[in-house]
Image: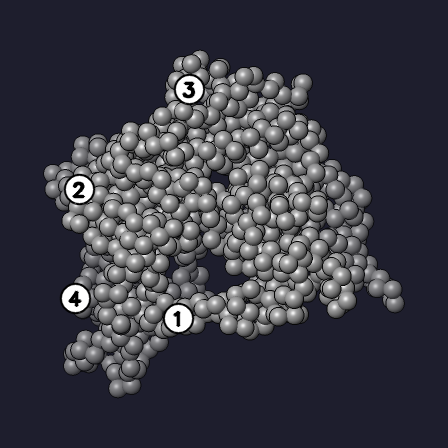
Amino acid sequence: MHGFISIKGAKEHNLKNINIDIPKEKLVVITGVSGSGKSSLAFDTIYAEGKRRYVESLSAYARQFLEAQAKPNVESIEGLSPAIAIDQKATSRNPRSTVATATEIYDYLRVLYARIGIPYSPATGLPIEKQTASQMTEEILKLPENTKLYILAPIARGQKGEYRKELLMMRKHGYERVKIDDSFYEFDDLPMLDKNRKHEISVVVDRISLDNELGNRLADSVETALKLSDGILYVEIVSIPEEVESKNKAGDVLVFSEKFACHVSGFSLTEIEPRIFSFNSSYGACPYCNGLGTEIYFDQGLIVPNLQLSIAEGAILPFSKSVISIVSQLKFHEQTFESLARHYKFSTTQPFNSLSEEIRNVIFYGSGNESISFTYDDGFRKSTVKKTFEGVIPLLEKRMQKTESSQVAEEMANYQTAKDCSACNGYRLKMESLCVKIAGKHIGEMCNMTISQSLEWFAHLKEALNNTHKQIAERLVKEITKRLKFLNDVGLDYLTLNRKATTLSGGESQRIRLASQIGSGLSGVLYVLDEPSIGLHQRDNDRLLNTLWHLRDLGNTVIVVEHDMDTMKTADHLIDVGPGAGVHGGQIIAQGRPEEVAQVKESITGKYLSKELVIEVPKSRRPGLKDKFIEITGARSNNLKNISVSIPIGSFVAFAGVSGSGKSSFVINTLYKAALKKLHHSKITPGAYDKITGLEYIDKIIQIDQSPIGRTPRSNPATYTGAFTHIRDWFAALQESKARGYSSGRFSFNVKGGRCETCEGDGVIKIEMHFLPDVYVRCDECKGSRYNKETLEIKYKDKSIADVLNMTVDEIAEFFPNVPLILEKAMALKEVGLGYMKIGQSATTLSGGEAQRIKLAKELSKKSTGRTLYILDEPTTGLHMHDIQKLLVVLHKLVDAENTVVVIEHNLDVIKTADYVVDMGPEGGSKGGAVVATGAPEEIISSKESITGKYLKPLLI
């Protein structure tokens, strides 16, 4: 069928042998309850087959460099176009990757600065002019008399190759010596150069001593070197007379260029090329931080996390008994601090925060030149040593440098934190690179701006350029502006260009890649997207939808896995997968125009579209526990504007606001980390704030996020919730187990004894196929059960331990009705809507939403004190409206037990059910960070400044 992607017999994961025709060059939305099989159809079948066909079309040589692709479990797919997936999982872990580099904007900026940038002297602030040969000669003659030096002409600077022809030519011209990669060679004894390595090669033009007999020799040599090396000259100092004071020393290499130099300071630039603006190149990267922009240092706040403790109580964490287990070492450090206390007249039993600033400086940084008498007694003899005290931080630095143990390095890292590099101020580049400016800004300052600020800056750039520069910059500025506009259109206007990719959320990362794809202008492509609306405020949804339509209008097929109602309503074609989740899903319940799906009675999605099902607004709001609040004043991390926020205890509190408004900066970076540090003496550093009060009303704080519950197939819902321990105990308590002497460990697949040793408890065996994908085959020995024959002989109600692990949560609840410890774990999982899930399902196959609900179930199964603060960051991610309904029941149940629940959320159906809303904004990035409105949802909609209130109003009236 020409206008369709025709799929027959799709059986991947829980798909029930489905057949479906998907229209091409349309916006197609696939929806359904969580776990119904949406991703199995979109990503694991359609995209996986598209990618596999592309890889298979390549040569065997090319395939060895690519990840091999397994064929999805489908009979046939026809009409498939080249496929590109834009999911939420590919957030970069590379600390060098930024928003600018990920979108190619930085590549264009580097060329722009290289072509029209003007260098300025760091000494005078004036533009740098080109140097002449005579000026260089004068500068060299300023070196002390009798200084010996080499005049070098660089012919290769950080470039790959063997350079045989060039070196042969130099030899023919009569040159005798050459410097290759820091070593000097005679032309008769040259090494073989690796053509795949970058080399530094300089011809020795002359060897000179700066004495009275020099004459014109220096000037002639300078001119000769400049001709050989395209206007660049190296002067390497061999020696300087010892009796002479000089800022230079032997081994220094002075760089001169006919291009740019400052007459006052002597500062010069060898070149202005794109590579000097790259922090991934040795030509541009700051030599102190290697282009990372940060330096690691030992943080006093992490070394002494609890200032109320005394030294004797373990205030200095790395030297406390909670870290040091060897008694003799602990005793040595105790006696060191006692001797220090005697000398400086303080007590090791007084709280650390009562020590004077002077004493604290001695403890952290040492006694300088002041000697101290240290007395040590190891139980056998007593000794006194007079010496200076190094200081806690220098001792830790020395230990970090000397250790070869990864365990010690990890421990030391607990006391370290990162700050902007003091040499480059966090800009990542060399001083020479940062001297080049356009319209008063260097490239680092340019990247410090947000997307919206950058768009405005480029809109006015022409006014600051002369006619020549305007012509040179025109195409480059057009490309940069185009990419900035696409980022702005997908709701990322608040991000700065130098924002690290590692700090982006899954939704932000996905939208950056979406913007990059639009910039590429491809057509005839199949795009598969995973919930692009995640992390977007309702206001920004319209801009996202315009982007998706634009992608479609270029002639592409856009398949979106989505739960957002607005996206569903605007789809050209809507597919509802269900009816339930897991084994109860995997079927196509309805498809067609959104209004057609709304008429299908069997479709849960249809019922929400037709408003037959809705999430109700609560009849009343909880007032919170009387006069009990957690209050943070002066919060100012990231973009927060010194805000103060009160959170009512015993309430369901929602933090709302546009993307980048400061919600996570306050809730996660400040509230959560500050409470964790105060309540549990955590080593993490919270964002800056003045004061936090009200923590006496809670006894623990729990963050429930969407990170995986485990990264190996051995992790599963049973192991994570603790149900597996009770199941193993139950099997070990059976009469047959006792007769055989089997303990609980016998029923573990992680240790030897009861597991199958052929597959080591995995149930499958991995076979490497080289050019083909690795094949996982069921273990012949245990038939995939993970256990050996003897263990499987132990049965309860005719079921072995392997049979139990293969049961769903619903089946477990029916199978163990009289075993409270197992039943309560199963009921908690059922309560969060995971009754369909197999108790032994591998953690690697779980979605983020499923992982979060398993964590929530684990908390539900614990005994509640009624004094817990729960924090959830966008808990509706990956959840269908029907699942959100179940989630809200659970969250409100926690609050009914007098716990406090704080959520960061964009979903209006969640916000409308909250007792108290904190709306942040008014915009994102530098224009955000303020509290726009607080109160019950009814109060938020009455605020004229609240953007959230504007969109919330129709749901409450």
Residue found at x 36% / y 73%: 770
Residue 485 in the image, given as x and y percentages of width and height: 25, 36
- Which structural element holds mark 4? helix
From the viewer's side, name the closer residue of 488 and 420. 488
Badge 3 or badge 1: first in the primary sequence: 1
Q: Position of residue 946 (x, y in %)?
A: 42, 19
Query: Tag 1, which secondary structure?
Result: strand
177 or 857: nearer the eye? 857
Badge 1 amino acid: Ser
Q: Position of residue 91 (x, y in %)?
A: 40, 49
Decide if residue 99 is on the left or right side of residue 225: right
Disc 3 marks a residue whose amino acid type is Leu
Residue indicated by mark 3: 955
Q: Earlier in the sequence, mark 1 or mark 4?
A: 4
Depth order, front residue of 245/844: 844
Q: Is residue 723 left or right of residue 906?
A: right
What is the secondary structure assignment of the residue under circle 2? loop
The mark found on residue 239 in the picture is 1
